[in-house]
Image: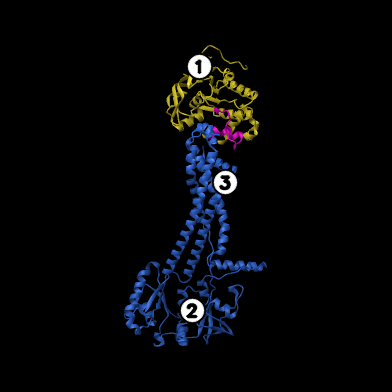
Chain colours: A yellow, B blue
Amino acid sequence: MPLVELRDIHKVYHLGGEEIRALDGVSLDINEGDFCSIIGPSGSGKSTLMHILGCLDSPTSGTLKLDGMEIQNATPRQLATIRNQKIGFVFQFFNLLPKLNVLQNVELPMVYSGLGGRERRERAMEALRHVELENRSKHRPSQLSGGQQQRVAIARALVNNPRIIFADEPTGNLDSHTGELILDMFRGFHREGRTIILVTHDPEIAALTSHKIEIRDGKIAANLDRTLAGLDRPIPAAV
Amino acid sequence: MNLVNVILTGLREVWAHKFRSLLTMLGIILGVSSLVAMSALVKGMEVGMKSALAEMGGLEKIRVESQLELPLHQRHLQDRVRGVTMKDVTALRAGAPLVHTVTPSVDVGGWGSRTVVEYRGKRARPYLFSGTWPEALEINEHEIAHGRMFNHYDDELARNVCVIGTGIRDELFGEPDTPEDGVVPIGESITINGQPFVVIGMFRHYESEEYRKRRQARLAAIARGEQPPSMGRDHFVYRLKNRTIYIPLSAMLLNFRTGSGVNAAADAQLSTLYMKIPDIALLEPALQQVRNVLMVNHAGLEDFSFRTDEDWANEISTTIRNYRMSGSIIAAICLIVGGIGIANIMLASISERVREIGIRKSVGATTLDVFVQILVESVVLTMLGGLAGLAVSFGLVVIVGNFSPEESVPMVTMGALLIAFGASALVGLIAGIVPAIKASKLHPIQALKYD
């Protein structure tokens, strides 16, 4: 059974009386352990697709199954719980809270899942060790480089041990070398067996992934699953 | 998200904008401190007024005074007017069981009288000069500190003896530093309007609690060699009691003949009849009973009138209620203005923090989490303001105390502090609702896209 199952998803916006079909009948499956990329030019609907996949938004019509649960009709509260427990986000602009230090930022998802202070701290430090930033735990995000900030964001995405990690242009705001390091990290997570969905407009990055979905005008233009196509895992470590 | 975390987040947010938070809290600080100061001021007045009332004999005391002008419908009987007399005393003692300690009094003096007391060339004017019975001691809440009160033998023999207050002593024999260790003029002979009287007793010194404290502060200042603060004057009630002279009723009638002048001394007109009731609940029936007895005795002539301190007590209640009302309105307006300020700043800060809210929602904060967070921030802000306001209020009370009427000094009560603090929390709660709803309704995507 696929981890994520989309069937005939539509998303319609109304902008000044005009109807915009951001997604127009999208169906796709993403399996557990996939390193999946969603690629497409800006305005293609890939961000909308990711928002719906990431439970930040609800589709206008269609069904969405995540980890066996139908969630197209979930309440905002249920969506919040799913985001908290099953999904980790990594954004292009890092989206750390500037007033909190690194440790507190990583603790944030666990604050909302109601964990006690001691356990939060231990797990946050563990996640920071994972991204090799445990010695920066008391720093403010503004005292870190872009790459370090993105690693903090990754630690935050990992800390609740989610089923899926979403990354929206995670290297878009970094220089190529740092971007490379971050992508290496995602490849590492993939080897550990995690499911990763990466949104990008860069075909080179998409080429690194095992499952490539191309979106154009709100429809799926190409859906290439290398695992299914017989191209074996693991993906080469470097290009 | 547990409450401790939310509160810590709120405190962090307040701390991150120290100056802005302080400015925002100012309205609450003013509101809370003015609420406390106002209630302290009113409480002080209330306590001062009520202790003065108790000092005069309290609500259980009834006075019947001669009313020499008859009401209109009896005006044609004006020549039969005698006022209250000793016959009434006897009648009331026999026929009005609801009242006790019926005590006659003939008063000379009061303000503007020509009563003069002299001792070796020094002169004093009493506020109250009464010929009465020994029971006057009990009924007017007097206490003898030195010597003795005159007794019924003194009255029967019409002896020229008197009991004076410390105020009279101060003027005739010199004022000591502390009223307790002045001259005790027992056995001294003084003249009252030219008639010789022997001082056989002196009352204790009467003063309000506040005035005593002020006097001690002054003495302490003098002891330290500092400029002593000005004392002001104590409440009128205490000054009146300190400047009272009592002599036996018959001595008053024989020496000064202030009775009707027509009747013999035995049935002379009295100024006042004092009596007490055992319980305030019996006031109405007791008044009715006394009235009935007097009406029979006076053949229906209404040449007497009742005076109780009920009116005084009502007046105190009304005054206090009015002061409290106007003070509360001012404080409430302060708090409302402060609350509007808080709501305004919170709304502005929400627009600033759209991104933060989006991030929090994307990692799993529910609508309720965000709502509670903003609400708690608002309450934390106003409660900090409330605490600061309580601190400020103590200073404010001292300042206000210097302007307040001399006989009342502000009293800060625990209840006022709690109410003021509770009001600050309530204002935060109300002011935070709209910003909290606005913040919690933000859609995570919109919030994340926001720059």
CA distance for labels 3 and 1: 54 Å
Q: Secondary structure at mark 3?
A: helix
Residue type at the position of mark 2: Gly
Q: Residue at x 48, y 48 (%)?
A: B426
Q: Secondary structure at mark 1?
A: strand
Could you say where residue A116 lies in the image, as x and y percent from the top left? 54, 35
Residue type at the position of mark 1: Ala
> Image height check: is A88 above or below B241?
above
Mark 1 surroundings within 10 Å by alpha-carbon count, few (fewer than 14), some (14 through 19), many (20 or more): few
The quadrant of the rendering that contains the C terminus of chain B is: top right
> Image height check: is B15 above or below A69?
below
Residue type at the position of mark 3: Ser
| Residue matched to label 3 | B21
Q: Are marks 3 and 1 on the same chain?
A: no
Lateral position of residue B75 relative to residue A85, left or right: left
| Residue matched to label 1 | A222
| Residue matched to label 2 | B110
Task: Tell me the chain of label 1.
Answer: A
Circle number at residue A140: none
Lateral position of residue B294 relative to residue B448, left or right: left
Could you say where residue B117 lies in the image, as x and y percent from the top left? 54, 83
Camera-nearest label, 3 or 2: 3
CA distance for labels 2 and 1: 112 Å
Mark 3 surroundings within 10 Å by alpha-carbon count, few (fewer than 14), some (14 through 19), many (20 or more): some
Q: Work out whether residue B235 or residue A209 is closer to the camera in this orientation and state it.
A: A209
